[in-house]
Image: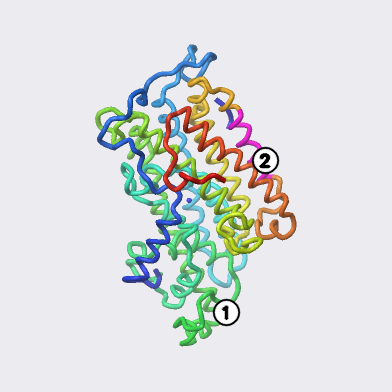
Amino acid sequence: MRTSRSGLLLTGAPIAAAVALYALSSGCERVSYYSTSGSAPSGTGATTTTAASTGPGGPSGEVTRSQVLAAVGTCAAALYTSVAAAAVELDTATQAASGSDVEARATAREAWGKMMDLWQQAELLRIGPAGPTALPQGQSLRDYVYSWPLTSRCLTEQTIVSKAYEASSFAQTALINVRGLAATEYLLFYEGADNACGASATINSAGTWAALGPAELAARKAAYAAVATADVVAKTRQLADAWAPDEGNFGAALANAGESGSPFSSAQMALNAVSDGMFYVEREVKDLKIGRPLGLYECATDTCPEAVESRYARVAIRHARNNLAGFRRIFAGCDEGDQVGFDDLLTASGSGALAERMRADVDAAITAAEGFSDPDLIGALASDRAQVEALHASVKKITDALKTEFVSVLDLEIPQVVEGDND
């Protein structure tokens, strides 16, 4: 108990390529070996373990997997409620921001930042409607809200030229890499007159991009952003309603895992599904958000600043900080969930020292992220690589324990995308 993620519609091969890239980049696309219809291995159900000191389960310190899952549901419902409210604020701001209104665009940028701060915490919740379709009630809504690292500036710019965002079917048919918060970031923050498409691309070879002119380009970006954020409102409303106790109440499906009516065959299976999302700090944060720009992972040069998240808003370090805060909400609990989290389950399992160490490591990593004078990772790579390396090392301390001691004590699986990763 502690304090506290088309315009030009592609067909055939382009779609297949996009899907293939998405499959490779998804951090937790897997299903636990605990079948949604079968039974859990012996000893992994909603059994009770007892801690030596008082715990969230009562004076005896009893903690069950079901109690932790119920707390996760409560924390998720509260977070998604805040996310949905922030999405409305963002949409209101973008609807009011025309291409020529500098002040209104600044307000929209601020609203985007507020929305992203919350969404980056929710990135760790890869269950329920936000999760992959292979999981119970999964609808992959996360990807419609924020598709990173699957993004495409060129496709977004082709959509600007074609004005495909004006189609009534855009929300139903547009590819994920030309919509959501990632596309909105480019539309709100990038002010250059160039585009990222090759010379042979139609918008360049036919001169349709150059023919727009600065004023028309700004106007189309503003109109496109308004369409994109309206869709974000719809998707985040779906998520909030799905978790709300008086609506879809997905949290009850977690808390009642193993009981009749729950899509989870056991509490252990549900716990494994939740823990898969926690591995976002391993693949996405440690490797993709920090390691790749540092040149430590899938980078052929000393650094790869082009791999930095939020290259237009330049707040990648802030995103990492919020990812870590999202991890802490699940691991150590949130206020709404009475601070019940996985750390309590570790303590009840006799691994209180591990729980304490991991809490300290999470707090240290958050402090390291907060220690940057500017949230721009591209600038930090150039001015103070050592500080970025220190942040990477602090996240690695968390993930080293997560994929070894943590999963061992709680008898959890490591997501397949992480298996074999020894760094």
Residue at the spot of label 1: 214
Residue 168 in magenta stretch: no
**Where is residue 151 drawn, in percent x and y?**
48, 63
Name the dominant secondary structure of the magenta segment: helix
Residue 179, quarter of picture:
bottom left
Up-down relation of residue 201 to residue 95 (above or below): below
Helix, strand or loop status at disc 2: helix
Which residue is at a point 48% across and 52% down the rendered structure image?
A: 87
Count up the numbered dots. 2
- Mark 1: amino acid: Pro
Residue at the spot of label 2: 367
**Where is residue 132 drawn, in percent x and y?**
36, 48
Mark 1 or mark 2, earlier in chain: 1
- Work out which residue is located at the far bottom of the displayed protein and give it: 206
The residue closer to the viewer here, 277 or 103, is 277
* Chain part drawn in magenta: 357-370
- Work out which residue is located at the far right of the displayed protein and give it: 383
**Where is residue 199 drawn, in percent x and y?**
51, 83
CB of mark 1 within 8 Å of CB of mark 2? no
Which residue is at a point 51% across and 74% down the rendered structure image?
A: 219
Label 1 vs label 2: CA separation? 42 Å
Q: Looking at the figure, which quarter contains the N terminus?
A: top right
- Mark 2: amino acid: Thr
Residue 4, quarter of picture:
top right
Residue 359 in magenta stretch: yes
Up-down relation of residue 369 to residue 361 (above or below): below
